[in-house]
């Protein structure tokens, strides 16, 4: 996968955004989110930023999304990634994201 921008690594806890929706995320550390906001031009719509994410040996293309509530960006971690990495809600994981 082609990485064209900076890379950020951090530890975070997997959490469900809404018990009914079954969406699982990790929140980026505020300092990393601030740096990404400075690097990426403001985008229309949701303000998503394309990234390559990695947890354990599992790597995938996705986007991070700004969250006013978290005052950061959120990285969605889909079921197939959680199953492959053998992780679940409440686990603390080491995450690497690279801007593309």
Image (cartoon, rainbow, N blue to C red):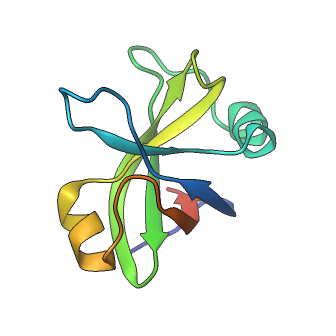
- Where is residue 48 shown, x and y percent of the image? 44, 31
Residue depicted at 56% across the width and 61% down the height = 98
Q: Residue 16 versus residue 36: which sits nearer the camera?
A: 16
Q: Is residue 95 above or below residue 16?
A: below
Which image quadrant for residue 7? bottom right
92 on left or right of 65: right
99 on left or right of 24: right
Q: Is residue 21 above or below residue 14?
A: above
- Where is residue 31 shown, x and y percent of the image? 81, 41
Residue depicted at 70% across the width and 31% down the height = 37
Instruction: Specify the farthest residue to the bottom.
Output: 57
Q: Residue 15 versus residue 47: which sits nearer the camera?
A: 15
- Where is residue 16 shown, x and y percent of the image? 36, 38
- Which quadrant: the N terminus? bottom left
Regarding residue 8, the answer to whether it shows in the image is: no
Which image quadrant for residue 86? bottom left
Regarding residue 95, the answer to whether it shows in the image is: yes
Residue depicted at 60% across the width and 55% down the height = 12
51 on left or right of 23: right
Q: Residue 95 versus residue 52: which sits nearer the camera?
A: 95
70 on left or right of 50: right
Q: Is residue 75 above or below residue 86?
A: above
How many numbered marks are there?
0
Q: Residue 53 versus residue 6: which sits nearer the camera?
A: 53
Residue depicted at 46% across the width and 51% down the height = 14
Q: Is residue 47 above or below residue 44?
A: below
């Amino acid at each position: 996968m082609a990485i064209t921008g900076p890379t950020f690594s951090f530890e975070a806890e997997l959490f469900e955004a809404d018990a009914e929706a079954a969406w699982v995320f990790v929140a980026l550390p505020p300092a990393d989110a601030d740096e990404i906001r400075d690097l990426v031009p403001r985008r229309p719509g949701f303000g998503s930023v394309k990234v390559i994410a990695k947890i354990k040996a599992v790597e995938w293309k996705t986007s991070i999304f700004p969250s006013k509530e978290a005052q950061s960006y959120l990285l969605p971690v889909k079921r197939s990634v959680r199953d492959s990495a053998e992780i679940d809600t409440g686990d603390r994981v080491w995450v690497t994201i690279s801007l593309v």
